[in-house]
Image: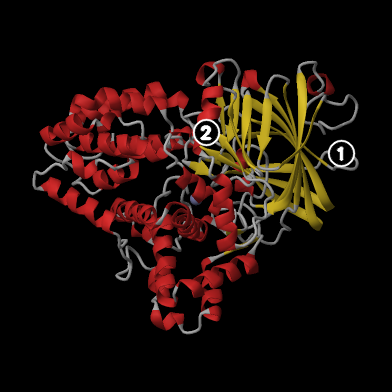
């Protein structure tokens, strides 16, 4: 067998799936899904055929025409903790196969929320997060971005609930008795129960499996543009706040189209999830998933929307072939996001974003100082859990690389280059070498002007990377430097600061200060009580590192009310990393044991890794 992807059991000699048809029965009381997966291949295949699975029980594998069982095995017998097990089916001249399976309550892609964990506290809620390699914990698939699939799905859910997907909603209807539409997922007695309804979806554009997504709950929506709706739990206060925050969505889509070419996904809807959502946003096509922490009431959440929107071109249209080339998704998207922000909110706002990103890059390089492999753009991830090495590097070093090329050839030429790149590779999955060859072919001589090998294969930050040039950026950084000398900014100096200015300021302070200095800063500017989590968490991190235990209460509250890994990772790390932290370690362990059930399984895993490393 030859591997396609270090994170997948997919065999390069097997055909790649082109279409998947799913029948999914949602059983909320047991937090499981009964699934029938019909896999279609482009050609007939005989012999072993390998799929990825993780914590699935496989009930049977069937020939779709005769419904006779086909032989299968699961290996290794003891599942790999990260990659799971390969399901090896023996095919004989088949181009289709049906797998009947059941998820486990610990499926790493799914978070099941009981009614008390939701905003209205009336109905349960479930949602997916499949990136990087969690789709295999919902249904068996070739779980590599090298495989691009179209899909259709029937979601059988309780009548009081609504379903959304990263796909076109076709119909909401009663289940049909005797139609065979459950396709073996469960009996008609379950599928056609009185309290059940079926939502039908269709995804006609080929996507990598990590972009498969659904959410089921008591959902409502508001229209925010001609092709955009914002969905959330059906609470008027949440929906109204989200509609206000994202009112500028259509303007951003138009800017994106001007810069990168037509928006190819028809609709751009947004789903605001419960606070446990582990990321800021997830670029699921047609239906971006967002953390509620981006709703700040001042439209700065638009930056996350700009990022997820930009993925519609870079990431979703052109996809990294494996996670080893993740910068092709995230570096391009960070570049594209800042171009959208610059067009919509101005150069200063874009410069602040670049400055915050620069600090993030410096810190990420520091985080990997003992394992510099993961400071490269093109990485070797053999045997590595992609969630564990997730960092700002592919985002910010990738951004810096593209910005460097822009500076070399000028913006008009770079804009033309990006448009051509997207048009050439859309709906394809590519690697770093494919990008570099395209760059060299279209920008002759570029390899003599920029050290492309150093940028893509070298460690750390190349010497020709740079900080943004902007007066507001320079002023904030110099104010942060003055704090080191004991001067706090005056009120008139910060009068027009929003969250991002404070975030940049705090991130440029030393890692720790005298506890009295942290207390004095907070006494004047109330940063620990900020409604903006970026500011609040940056301050709490400083307070913890400065051994200022007055804030344990606020830290505990924060760790229990949000599950976004951008906040969990630095707060837990600040608590347990370093010497003389006995009290902090006991505190961190207790808070995690109490908060764990409120975190998504991916976030649980990340926090467990941090605690294992330091406690
Ligand atoms: Zn992204």
Q: Nearer the viewer, residue 162 or 244?
A: 244
Residue, far left: 485
The label shown at residue 242 is: 2
Q: Nearer the viewer, residue 600 or 446?
A: 446
Count residues near mark 1 (Cα–Cα under 10 Å), then give few for <14, some for 14-19, many for 20+. Answer: few
Going by the image, does 572 lie left or right of 270?
A: left
Dividing the picture into quarters, in which one does residue 134 lie?
top right
| Residue at the image position 43 percent from the left and 51 percent from the top | 345
| Residue at the image position 83 percent from the left and 25 percent from the top | 175
The label shown at residue 68 is: 1
Quarter of the picture holding the C terminus: top left
Residue 7 appears in view: no
Q: Nearer the viewer, residue 260 or 493?
A: 493
Residue 415 appears in view: yes
Residue 53 lies, in percent from the top left, at 63, 42
Gap between marks 1 and 2 measured at Cα: 50 Å
Residue 310 lies, in percent from the top left, at 54, 54
Secondary structure at badge 1 equals loop
């Amino acid at each position: 067998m030859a591997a396609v992807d270090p994170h997948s059991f997919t065999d390069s000699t097997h055909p790649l799936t082109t279409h998947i048809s799913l029948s999914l029965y949602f059983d909320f009381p047991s937090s499981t899904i009964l699934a029938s997966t019909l896999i279609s291949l482009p050609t007939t295949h005989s012999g072993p055929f390998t799929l990825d699975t993780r914590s699935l029980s496989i009930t049977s594998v069937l020939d779709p025409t005769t419904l006779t069982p086909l032989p299968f095995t699961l290996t290794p017998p003891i599942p790999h903790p990260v990659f799971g097990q390969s399901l090896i089916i023996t095919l004989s001249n088949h181009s289709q196969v049906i797998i009947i399976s059941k998820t486990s309550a610990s499926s790493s892609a799914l978070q099941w929320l009981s009614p008390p964990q939701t905003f209205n506290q009336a109905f349960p809620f479930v949602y997916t997060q499949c990136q990087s390699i969690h789709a295999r914990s919902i249904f068996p698939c070739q779980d590599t971005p090298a495989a691009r699939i179209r899909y259709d799905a029937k979601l059988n859910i309780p009548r009081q609930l609504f379903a959304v997907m990263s796909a076109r909603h076709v119909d909401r209807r009663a289940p049909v008795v005797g139609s065979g539409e459950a396709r073996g997922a469960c009996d008609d007695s379950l599928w056609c129960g009185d309290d059940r309804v079926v939502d039908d979806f269709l995804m006609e554009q080929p996507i990598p499996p990590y972009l498969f997504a659904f959410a089921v709950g008591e959902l409502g929506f508001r229209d925010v543009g001609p092709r955009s709706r914002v969905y959330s739990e059906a609470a008027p206060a949440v929906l109204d706040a989200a509609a206000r925050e994202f009112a500028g969505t259509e303007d951003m889509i138009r800017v994106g189209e001007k810069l990168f070419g037509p928006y190819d996904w028809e609709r751009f809807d947004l789903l605001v999830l419960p606070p446990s959502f582990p990321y800021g946003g997830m670029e699921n096509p047609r239906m971006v998933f967002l953390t509620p922490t981006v709703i700040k009431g001042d439209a700065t959440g638009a930056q996350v929307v700009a990022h997820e929107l930009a993925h519609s071109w870079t990431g979703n249209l052109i996809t990294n072939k494996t996670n080893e080339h993740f910068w092709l998704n995230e570096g391009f998207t960070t570049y594209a996001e800042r171009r959208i922000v610059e067009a919509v909110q101005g150069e200063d706002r874009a410069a602040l974003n670049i400055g915050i990103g620069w600090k993030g890059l410096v810190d990420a390089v520091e985080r990997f100082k003992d394992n510099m492999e993961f400071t490269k753009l093109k990485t070797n991830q053999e045997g590595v859990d992609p969630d564990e090495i997730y960092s700002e590097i592919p985002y910010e070093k990738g951004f810096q690389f593209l910005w460097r090329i822009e500076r070399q050839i000028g913006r008009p030429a770079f804009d033309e280059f990006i448009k051509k790149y997207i048009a050439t590779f859309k709906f394809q999955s590519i690697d770093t070498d494919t990008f570099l060859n395209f760059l060299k072919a279209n920008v002759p001589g570029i390899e003599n002007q920029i050290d492309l090998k150093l940028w893509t294969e070298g460690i750390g930050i190349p010497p020709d990377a740079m900080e943004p040039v902007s007066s507001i950026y320079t002023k904030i950084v110099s104010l942060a430097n003055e704090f080191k000398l004991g001067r706090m900014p005056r009120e008139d100096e910060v009068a027009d600061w929003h969250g991002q200015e404070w975030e940049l300021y705090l991130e440029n302070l030393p890692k720790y200060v005298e506890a009295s200095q942290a207390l004095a800063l907070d006494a004047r500017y109330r940063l620990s009580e900020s409604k903006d989590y970026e500011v609040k968490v940056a301050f709490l991190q400083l307070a913890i590192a400065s051994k200022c235990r007055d804030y344990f209460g606020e830290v505990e509250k924060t760790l229990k009310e949000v599950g976004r890994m951008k906040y969990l990772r630095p707060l837990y790390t600040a608590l347990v990393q370093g010497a003389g932290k006995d009290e902090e370690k006991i505190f961190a362990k207790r808070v995690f044991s109490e908060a764990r059930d409120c975190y998504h399984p991916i976030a649980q895993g990340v926090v467990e890794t941090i605690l294992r490393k330091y406690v």
